[in-house]
Amino acid sequence: MDKNKVVFAYTKESPRSEYLINILKDEFDLVIASSCEEITNILHESYDSLEALIIDHPSDKDDIGRLFDYVSKRNSFMFTLPIIILTELSMMEEDDKFLSDLVVGMIVKGETKRTVLQRIRNTIKFSNSASFDDFSDALTHLPSLIYLKDKRGRYAFCSQRWHHLRKPNESIRGLTDFDIRKSKENARIAQENDRKVVESGKGTTYMIKEEDDEGLEYLQIIKEPIKDENNNVTGIIAIINNVTDSELLRQELRKKSITDQLTGVFNRVYFEEIISGLKDKIEYPLTFISADCDGLKKINDKYGHAAGDKYICFARDAMNDFLPDNSILFRMGGDEFIALVPNLTNYAAKKLVKEISKNARKYKTPNFSLRLSVGSYTITSDHVSIEAAVNLSDKSMYKMKRKNK
């Protein structure tokens, strides 16, 4: 394991300096400088790789202010180099005046090796932690939320609060999604995806919907595993992006792509998608009901295409008003419609076809009334394919159309 790189600066060799060098030389990657000028050159060349700067008795150095100014200017919330003072009991009062946000610790000659090493390591750890706190504050300005979890799904860090929690103003550190989320379903989804990341060692991306008093939001969650040097998953880092605007736009475009513009029912594109998805999971019985407007061309020729559009919408109304609630109606093009009706028996389908056809003429204007040819076919087993059932439903409808003529 790499050692922390520490700089020790002293003015002249002394028992005090020798005492500290003997403690540090085997525990740290030790760089030794004997003047402020030398230490400034070392800082200039390798500042970002250093973990701490230890100065022997700063009250004895003429250029110590310049050195402190240099370190202060180089420090930032992303990187902080802590300064530690080496002193003696007789010099403590004199050196104590240097303690500040920059000079954060003091070692007194004569302390045990264990005490000295622990103090230096704690100082480095505290400095890194302080930098992380500043960094986490900076993350709050991002539109996205970033968080860390351990491998058990407990939150270790979160850059922001979000309002989908039961207690949004309280700390979530050490808690799980089931402890904090309003939506138990989203908590379950989060836990399941955490489990997949930990078990597979691979990241995942998914989207959830959150809805509360503040409105509807769609959130995209991207999760990646955190791994140790042995490639074992030790936790999860994740980012949450609010994708509500883009998702609503996507849904609107999707709706337009599968919806018939004139009638507002689904179109042939969506029918093909539904049929493709049904092939491997049909629940019987499944009925198809086909319908076709009679005399649309005459309506168009005599009263115009606006009247023809009204005629087609009458057909939609006649179908929707009598079809069961679990039906899905599609306009296949022109004046042709087809409905998909789950759990409708053949007998009930034939009865429904007669009812729709009989009541069609109730949809009318002063100039014309609707005449509709309707047919059906019911699949009761896998002996008949969906494509064949659609064709047989159409044939049943055309049989009625020939009678109507």
Image (cartoon, rainbow, N blue to C red):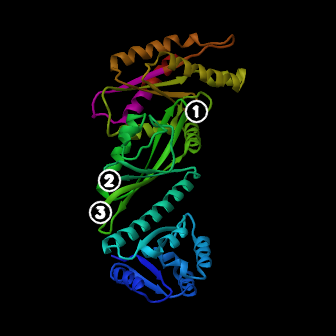
Residue lying at 51% horizontally and 47% vertically, measured from the top left: 160
Q: Of helix, strand and loop, which one carries label 3?
A: loop
Q: Is residue 295 visible?
A: no
Q: Position of residue 118 (x, y in %)?
A: 35, 68
377 to 101, vertically: above or below: above
Q: Say few, some or many: other residues with alpha carbon within 10 Å of mark 2 (under 14 / 14 to 19 / 20 or more).
A: some
- List the residue tagged with mark 2: 151
- Find the magenta span and give its range: 374-394
Specify the amino acid type for callout 3: Asn
Could you say where residue 102 lies in the image, as x and y percent from the top left?
Answer: 54, 68
Mark 3, Cα crowd under 10 Å, few <14 / some 14-19 / many 20+, is: few
- Residue tagged by mark 3? 232
Mark-to-mark CA distance, 1 and 2? 49 Å
Q: Quadrant of the C terminus?
A: top right
Between 305 and 42, the one lying in front of the other is 42
x, y percent for residue 349? 38, 19
Figure quadrant of residue 26: bottom left
First of labels 2, 3 by sequence position: 2
Check whether the beta carbons of the residues at disc 1 and disc 3 lie within 8 A of each other.
Answer: no
Residue 368 sits above or below residue 54 on the image: above
Q: Amino acid at mark 2?
A: Lys
Identified at 49% across, 11% down, the residue is 358
**Relative side of 385 to 206, left or right:** left
Looking at the picture, how far across and down is residue 125, in whole percent? 42, 65
Element under label 1? loop
- Residue under circle 1? 260
| Magenta span includes 232 | no
* Proximity of marks 2 and 3: CB atoms separated by less than 8 Å: no
Image quadrant holding the N terminus, namely bottom left
Say if 352 sits above or below 186 in the image: above
